[in-house]
Amino acid sequence: MKKILILAEHKKGQLKKASLELLTAAKGQDVKAVIFGSDAQNAANDLAVKGVSVVAWVKDAKFDAYLPDAYAKVIEDLIAEHKPEIVLGSASSLGKDLIPKLAARLDAPIVTDCIEVQLDPAIKVRRPFYSGKAMASVEFLPAPLAFISIRPNALAAGEVSSTKGTVKETTSSFDFGASPVQFVRRTQAASDRPDLTEANIILSGGRSMKTKENFKILYDAADVIGAAVGASRAAVDEGLASHDMQVGQTGKTVNPSLYIASGISGAIQHLAGMRTSKVIVAINKDPQAPIFQKADYGIVGDLFQVIPALTEEFKKIKAKA
Ligand SMILES: Cc1cc2nc3c(=O)[nH]c(=O)nc-3n(C[C@H](O)[C@H](O)[C@H](O)COP(=O)(O)OP(=O)(O)OC[C@H]3O[C@@H](n4cnc5c(N)ncnc54)[C@H](O)[C@@H]3O)c2cc1C
């Protein structure tokens, strides 16, 4: 059995699905977790219910906003106290920043953005390379501490065990006043839609959407099926969609069960962000568009006819369900 520390994340007290997926990776191991924020109590309790033996809850409101050095100090102190063999986190925006930082500070091996993980007896992971064109199987050499981040949606949400753990309020001596990095403000897009990186279904539009207003047909379809809406870089560069919607090499990496690419050509840089999606559907009026080589299902047609027609079909299916 391995000793594991999980870096858990929540949104307004609700444990993120990506954090539940970490529990699946750590199933049956000796698992502790850390979670930050004055509003994290429900998420901390949830971790304890799902078999995390000790949940270190950093309740101080100064930790509500992510500050890399502050979070790193807390985690370093927990590592020194609990001596985990593995630190597990999500390859989320926070995880992509914090986990390599910790590994560098502690001079420990790290593999990021894994999509398959075995922790016991040997630590073996698989992760995509070269924008998803190749897969690497990596085995860690024995080391006192290893860091792993897991791509959201790569594993099913789960639990460690049925034995309930405890939540322990944890304080930190981190000196916020002396920190060279200060939290100024958080600007958040007002959206109730699922996060792109966590969404189970994503409907993305490309340059072919032509105007910002035309994205409405994607939102209408997305609302019926509970999807997030993404975009190609061309759509973002032309001001049709915001940058936080960009999928691809210089945007977000997504891994939904269903990815619908609507009027997107399938450039390698776009594929880099979505090629591990479980099912890919492409809608394109050009039957030669490269996206069809990657798609599981293709619809050759004008998206301005296809998307509204699909929306109507989605509604009928939902009405029957
Ligand atoms: C360093 C670098 C990083 C990059 N990073 C990214 C990235 O992160 N994400 C990303 O997406 N791109 C990225 N790109 C850009 C990428 O190379 C492509 O230019 C971009 O993905 C193209 O976007 P698109 O498919 O929307 O547009 P286009 O390539 O113009 O394709 C539009 C498609 O829509 C189809 N179409 C047109 N009208 C209709 C219609 N009415 N109905 C149906 N289909 C229609 C066309 O047949 C065509 O296939 C990057 C490029 C570079 C150099």
Image (cartoon, helix red, strand yellow):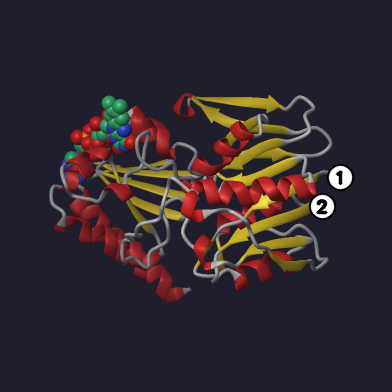
Q: In x, y percent, where is residue 283?
A: 29, 44
Q: Quadrant of the N terminus?
A: top right
Q: In the image, ligand 1 is in what quadrant?
A: top left
Secondary structure type for disc 2: loop
Q: Is the Cβ of the residue at disc 1 closer than 8 Å to that at disc 2? A: yes
Disc 2 target residue: 28
| x then y, percent, for residue 162 | 81, 65
Work out whether 54 lies above or below 278. below
Q: Is residue 136 left or right of residue 262?
A: right
Q: Position of residue 34 (x, y in %)?
A: 66, 57
* Marks 1 and 2, the one that precedes in the sequence: 1
Q: How many residues crowd mark 2 within 10 Å: few (<14), some (14–19), many (20+)?
A: some
Q: Mark 1 highlights which residue? A: 1
Work out whether residue 200 or residue 3 is closer to the camera in this orientation and state it: 3
Q: CA distance from mark 1 to mark 2?
A: 8 Å
Please tell me whether residue 313 is drawn above or below residue 206 in the rendered image: below
Q: Residue furthest right?
A: 1
Q: Which residue is painted at 61% across and 48% down in the image?
A: 73
The residue closer to the viewer here, 120 or 281, is 120
Q: Residues within 10 Å of mark 1 (few under 14, many from 20)?
A: few
Residue occupying the point 38% across, 64% down: 193
Q: Amino acid at mark 2?
A: Gly
